[in-house]
Image (spheres, rainbow, N blue to C red):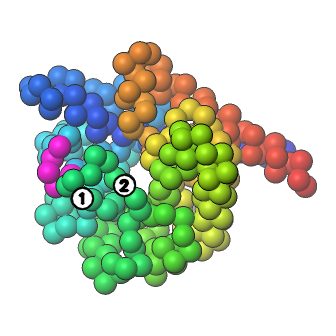
Amino acid sequence: MPAPVPIRLGVNVDHVATVRNARGGRHPDPVKAAELAIAAGADGITAHLREDRRHILDNDIVRLKDAITKPLNLEMAATDEIVRIARRLRPHAACIVPERRAERTTEGGLDAAGQAKHLRAVVRDLAASGIRVSLFIAPEPAQIEAAVALGAPVIEIHTGAWCEALAAGDAMAAEAEFERITRGAILAGSAGLEVHAGHGLDFLTAERISSLPEIAELNIGHFLIGESIFGGLAEVVRQMRSAMDRGRAASAVKAGGAR
């Protein structure tokens, strides 16, 4: 049986900055958190530079870009200001997300189909600066087809509805959402897109979604930073890495049994 294709873990350090900003000053430092996460097994670091700068600040992105030894993924809205910043700083990747100032966190996927005219120019300009562009979308055929048409090489599937259904104890809705994610990942993979996933994932959900062979990367933040209060960031990242590896290994066993 061939070895399973590894799945990458991107650690989002936004909420280290949230804690820092609550009091001001420099502690805790999201750059230090990023370095600890990488040492513990993270394959990359994600940070969301919001228009209102509620957590990550401009200088955090500069420092992360200079300090870390793994790829930096900049989550960003498709606004002129943030596009200019991204093109100047040139992170490894940029994930375009929807953004509303009133929301606590990103509440849904980007409407790539409905905003195609605007997004086409953004994807083109970021790609021209050597930035790998991802679109954070729901696993819907229309959105996946729009991502292909826009020329984005990567999508990130919004997993929030699935995780929320599980948290609410609605098993039927959760299974329906997981089936939607599964179909979306297969469709995107068959269209030549690299498929990532994230939002609301914990150890159990990360392990299960890692069993989908089309998923190349998970980006996880809030859960890891929250759990690190009790177990330490390095240990929590190691536990997440192990959960994802178990899920990926299970997919290889299943595929082998199906032959």
Q: Earlier in the sequence, mark 1 or mark 2?
A: 1
Q: Mark 2 Cα within 10 Å, few/some/many (few <14, many 20+)?
A: some
- Residue 53: say if magenta: yes
Question: Which residue is at a point 29% across and 34% down the rendered structure image?
Answer: 15
Please indicate whether residue 139 sits to the left or right of residue 250 in the image. Answer: left
What residue lies at 43% left-to-right and 24% top-to-bottom?
227
Q: Is residue 230 depicted above or below 44 in this figure? A: above
Secondary element type, mark 2:
loop
Are dots 1 and 2 in contact, CB under 8 Å? yes
Disc 2 target residue: 107
The CA span between labels 1 and 2 is 9 Å
**Label 1 element class:** loop
Report the amino acid beneath label 2: Glu
Q: Which mark is residue 100?
A: 1
Residue 153 in picture, x, y percent from top left:
47, 68
Quadrant housing residue 69: top left
- The answer to whether one can see residue 126 in this image is yes
